[in-house]
């Protein structure tokens, strides 16, 4: 949030954010309505529907709500674009084999996690936390970026 505040205050940059576990169409419609309400109404009208459109109470949802309402409050709403992945977590777009040493598919791992949850053995509910606890891997933003770079490079090499 601090980085975007500095960018809002000291540049004319257009800022884009990407979060997971949000419905992009619902978010886009709410942002469009907020912009319309901001022009024709009050700040409260503009932020009201936006808060309801951002789903959940996860860190990403709280960040997105704060980021968008901050843009509205400071009058820089035309300089922000939110994007969202529909999956509950970005990890669902990553090949699990690139994170842990296993030949199991993502579906196999989800089934294993579901069985652990059903057994009520104290397994974490969050998929990333479960992977970390079960397979002793630390999933960091840097690791996910490296996986994305490797995946992108492999795709380029295989298509060209």
Image (cartoon, rainbow, N blue to C red):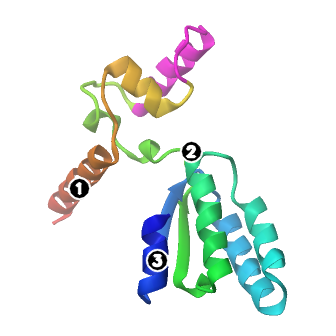
| Residue picked out by circle 2 | 88
- Residue found at x 43% / y 78%: 7
Give the magenta-colored segment's residue range: 106-124
Estimate the x, y position of residue 128 in percent, counting from the top left: 44, 33
Judging depth in this view, the residue of 57 and 145 nearest the camera is 57
* Mark 2 vs mark 3: in front: 3
First of labels 1, 2 by sequence position: 2
Q: Position of residue 6 (x, y in %)?
A: 43, 76
Corner quadrant of residue 67: bottom right
| Label 2 crowd (10 A; few <14 / some 14-19 / many >=20) | few
Report, in whole angstroms, how far the alpha carbon at label 2 lies from the one at label 3.
23 Å
C-alpha gap between disc 1 and disc 2 = 21 Å
Instruction: Indicate left or right for 8 with 69 as reference.
Output: left
User: Which one is closest to the eye, mark 1 or mark 3?
Assistant: 3
Q: Position of residue 72 (x, y in %)?
A: 66, 79
Q: Main secondary structure of the magenta part?
A: helix
Residue located at (31% from left, 21% from top):
136
- In this view of the protein, can residue 33 be seen by the observer? yes
Please indicate, yes or no, whether residue 14 appears anywhere in the rendered image. no
Q: Secondary structure at mark 3?
A: strand
In this view, 153 is above or below 94: below
In contact (CB < 8 Å): disc 2 and disc 3: no
Of callouts 1 and 3, the N-terminal one: 3
Residue in the image at 55% along x and 70% along y: 82
Tell me, yes or no, whether the highlighted magenta stretch contains residue 108. Answer: yes
Q: Mark on residue 149?
A: 1
């Amino acid at each position: 949030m601090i980085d975007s505040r500095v960018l809002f205050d000291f540049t004319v940059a257009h800022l884009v954010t990407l979060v997971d576990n949000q419905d992009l169409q619902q978010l886009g419609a709410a942002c469009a309505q907020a912009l319309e309400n901001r022009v024709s109404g009050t700040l409260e009208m503009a932020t009201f529907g936006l808060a309801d459109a951002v789903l959940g109470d996860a860190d990403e949802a709280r960040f997105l709500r704060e980021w968008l309402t901050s843009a509205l409050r400071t009058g820089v709403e035309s300089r922000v674009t939110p994007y969202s992945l529909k999956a509950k977590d970005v990890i669902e777009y990553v090949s699990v084999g690139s994170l842990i040493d296993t030949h199991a598919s993502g579906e196999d791992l989800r089934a294993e996690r579901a069985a652990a949850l059903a057994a009520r053995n104290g397994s974490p509910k969050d998929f990333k936390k479960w992977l970390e606890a079960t397979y002793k891997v630390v999933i960091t933003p840097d690791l996910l970026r490296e996986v994305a770079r490797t995946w992108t490079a492999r795709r380029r090499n295989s298509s060209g």
